[in-house]
């Protein structure tokens, strides 16, 4: 099967579900922390460049949900600077196999790309954030993060 470099927010249960699905399909997942990667404009655009600017952003990011950032109203340069300044705004996961890249986790696209090998898909949107009973907390500890956390709409 395939080895996938998987850029995630560690502790995010949505990313955990995605990695679990990939592993169940027989793929090897090498997870990397999206926030601590040394992103450059060129490197990030290798993932995002073919998508409309609005699709670069995590729709669950607090600033996006609150309307403070409206991806549809941003130009290319402004959007790129926002993402480089705060990688948690980037739509996740970013996945890479050699020189092939994918943004987000649309199961049909992932299946067509690398094959999900008929594994049972979980109910609901696998790209959406999964919240615990209190409405947050399933994306890992937020105690050390003062900035907006695009993983689950909490700070």
Image (cartoon, helix red, strand yellow):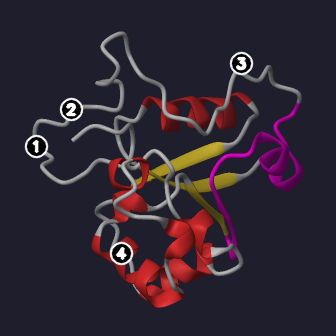
Q: What is the secondary structure assignment of the residue under circle 4?
A: helix
Depicted 63 relative to depicted 17: above or below:
below
Residue 22 is left or right of residue 66, and the answer is right
- Along the viewing direction, whichever of 56 and 93 lies nearer the viewer: 56
Residue that extends furthest to the top in the rendered view of this protein: 133
Q: Is residue 148 visible?
A: yes
Residue 104 is left or right of residue 117, and the answer is left
Q: What is the secondary structure assignment of the residue under circle 2?
A: loop
Along the polypeptide, which appears first: circle 4 or circle 1?
A: 4
Is residue 55 covered in magenta? no
- The residue under label 4 is 82
Which quadrant is home to the C terminus? top left
Q: Are marks 3 and 1 in contact (CB under 8 Å)?
A: no
Which quadrant of the structure image shows residue 119? top right
Pair 4/2: label in front? 4
- The residue under label 1 is 144
Which quadrant of the structure image shows residue 39? bottom left
Magenta segment, which residues?
Answer: 98-117
Separation of marks 2 and 3 at Cα, in angstroms: 25 Å
Q: Residues within 10 Å of mark 3 (few under 14, many from 20)?
A: few
Which residue is depicted at the point 52% across and 52% down?
92
- The residue under label 2 is 141
Is residue 101 covered in magenta? yes
Separation of marks 3 and 1 at Cα, in angstroms: 32 Å
Q: Are marks 4 and 2 in contact (CB under 8 Å)?
A: no
Along the polypeptide, which appears first: circle 4 or circle 2?
A: 4
- The residue under label 3 is 123
Along the polypeptide, which appears first: circle 2 or circle 3?
A: 3
């Amino acid at each position: 099967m395939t080895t996938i470099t998987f850029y995630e927010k560690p502790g995010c249960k949505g990313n955990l579900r995605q990695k679990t699905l990939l592993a169940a399909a027989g793929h090897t997942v090498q997870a990397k922390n999206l926030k601590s990667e040394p992103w450059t404009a060129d490197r990030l655009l290798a993932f995002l460049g073919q998508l409309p600017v609005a699709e670069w952003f995590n729709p669950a990011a607090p600033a996006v949900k609150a309307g403070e950032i409206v991806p549809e109203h941003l130009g290319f340069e402004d959007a790129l600077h926002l993402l480089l300044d705060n990688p948690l705004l980037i739509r996740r996961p970013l996945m890479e196999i050699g020189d092939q890249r994918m943004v987000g986790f649309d199961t049909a696209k992932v299946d067509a790309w690398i094959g999900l090998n008929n594994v049972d898909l979980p109910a609901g949107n696998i790209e959406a954030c999964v919240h615990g009973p209190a409405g947050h907390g399933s994306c890992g500890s937020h105690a050390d993060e003062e900035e907006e956390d695009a993983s689950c709409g909490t700070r």
